[in-house]
Image (cartoon, rainbow, N blue to C red):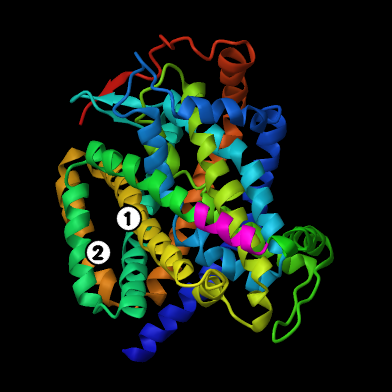
Amino acid sequence: MEQAIQQLADWLSRASGWLWGAPLLILLVGTHLFLTVRLRFIQRFIGKAIKLSVTRDEGGSGDVSPFAALTTALAATIGTGNIVGVATAVAAGGPGAVLWMWLTGVFGISTKYAEALLSVKYRTTKADGTIAGGPMYVLERGLKCKPLAIMFALFTAFAAFGIGNMVQANAITSMANESMGVPTWASGIVITILTAVVVLGGLRSIAKVCETLVPFMAVFYVLGCLVLIVIGWRTVPDTIVKIVSSAFTGQAAVGGFLGAGIREAMRFGIARGLFSNESGLGSAPIVAAAAQTRNPVRQALVSASGTFWDTVVVCALTGIVIVNSGEWMNGLSGAALTHAAFTKLPVVGSIILTVGLLTFAFSTILGWSYYGERAAEYLFGTKVIIPYRLLWVVAIMGGSVLQLHMVWNFADIANGLMAVPNLISLLALQGVLVAETRHWLWQGRIDEFDDSNETAVETKS
């Protein structure tokens, strides 16, 4: 039995490595670049997007405010990958990985915009008056391809339990055990109860918590990074030069680090950036579709600002802190590398890192619970909602005390498979994206209301 389990683990590891290798990375990055050109560098509207994200869209139809939708998406997106994932990229790909990671965020804004736009346009109103949307509805109603819609929903429902549930719970309990000596079962019970209180209340309950938690955790962590940068300000200019130059030269490190060429810097930087901001995976559009908005483009801009905050800001600051610390040259990786970098700020640095990891992981649990629930509902109807929520809460406890190497690999595979049908819809419906953007944004109608029937078609539950 042990041999069979080990063989399965090895197979999942190889499958994950292949899927997240060149084919998927090329498809994702290629889509980012193509949509950036096709949408006339939509990134230039990021200032307007940020302004819209904190402006209540009075009169717009939807279940939650644009800001609540954004913070719920950020809750799922800003996670351990922004802290541990960045360190892993630097350790494996050198300082240059930070620039490639940052660039995936810049160009990924266009993809996040596109998938949110389509999800709002093709969303539906259920019999109970609530909104349902996401790539599965885009694939079914926009692309007229039900099989791909079912594939996306199936992969999402399963992936949620991995990357959005068990591995996050495990990260929280492991951190609590290592930093404070709390038994994993004890912290697991606490996380399970907190999750149940929030998740069983549905989207509005999740959004309410995320509206408070996400700004706090992001500001708290970003301020910590800025303090560390100020402390090491003398070497920051050289650090930035090193990050930029290493991205194109593959500069090797010293002292226990094997060095990495430009290919490794690109590979690990792009892979970690894509995994962190989730642009192209199709997850964030599920909650974006539920936002109160006047027209699809308005909410698409708000959703696009999530990639800006996640990768262009948070991941970039983490990368600068890690490279500037010099600890990446000592053979460290992952959480150990990030911890070493943050200890440059005595006492407080460890607290900032611990609080950041705990809140980032918990918020991811909340955001992904909604993604998984909506995917399951699409497949099996409203009768699955309560059982799915209960199963979600139970899985938290399991993830808290189990070893999850296979779960990580399975989650990576399911995440990658989510992206394929979503990217197909984005490329196939590029004409719709351009037409909608031209009508609402380029022709100055961003404040007008969409009176078409596309966004309010009632379906049976």
Report if residue 143 is visible in the image: no
- The quadrant holding residue 261 is bottom right
Q: Residue at x 27, y 71 (%)?
A: 400
Q: Secondary structure at mark 1?
A: helix
What residue is drawn where x is 48% and y is 34%? 303
Under mark 1, the amino acid is Ile
Nearest the viewer among 307 and 432 is 307
Asked whether, in this view, residue 415 is left or right of residue 226, the answer is left
Q: Which mark is residue 365?
A: 1
Q: What's the residue type where badge 2 is placed?
A: Ile
Residue holding disc 2: 396
Work out whether 9 lies above or below 433. Answer: below
| Element type where label 2 sits in the image | helix
Magenta run includes residue 227:
yes
Return the x and y of residue 112 as percentages of the image width and height. Answer: 54, 38
Q: Which mark is residue 326?
A: none
Binning the other alpha carbons within 10 Å of mark 2 as few (below 14), some (14 to 19) or many (20 upward) gives: many
Q: Which corner quadrant holds the C terminus?
A: top left
Q: Which segment did they paint magenta?
A: 223-232
- Seen at 33% across and 52% down, the residue is 157
Give residue 244's position: percent from left, percent from top: 78, 57
**Magenta span main SS:** helix
Report the residue at 36% width, 77% height from top: 179
Picture quadrant where residue 6 is located: bottom left
Total count of labels: 2
- What is the x, y in percent for residue 431? 62, 24
Q: In this picture, is 392 found above or below 116?
A: below
The answer to the question of whether label 2 and label 1 lie on touching residues, with beta carbons closer than 8 A, is yes
Which quadrant: the N terminus?
bottom left
Q: Up-down: is 372 above or below 289?
A: below
In this rendering, position of residue 151 left or right of residue 393: right
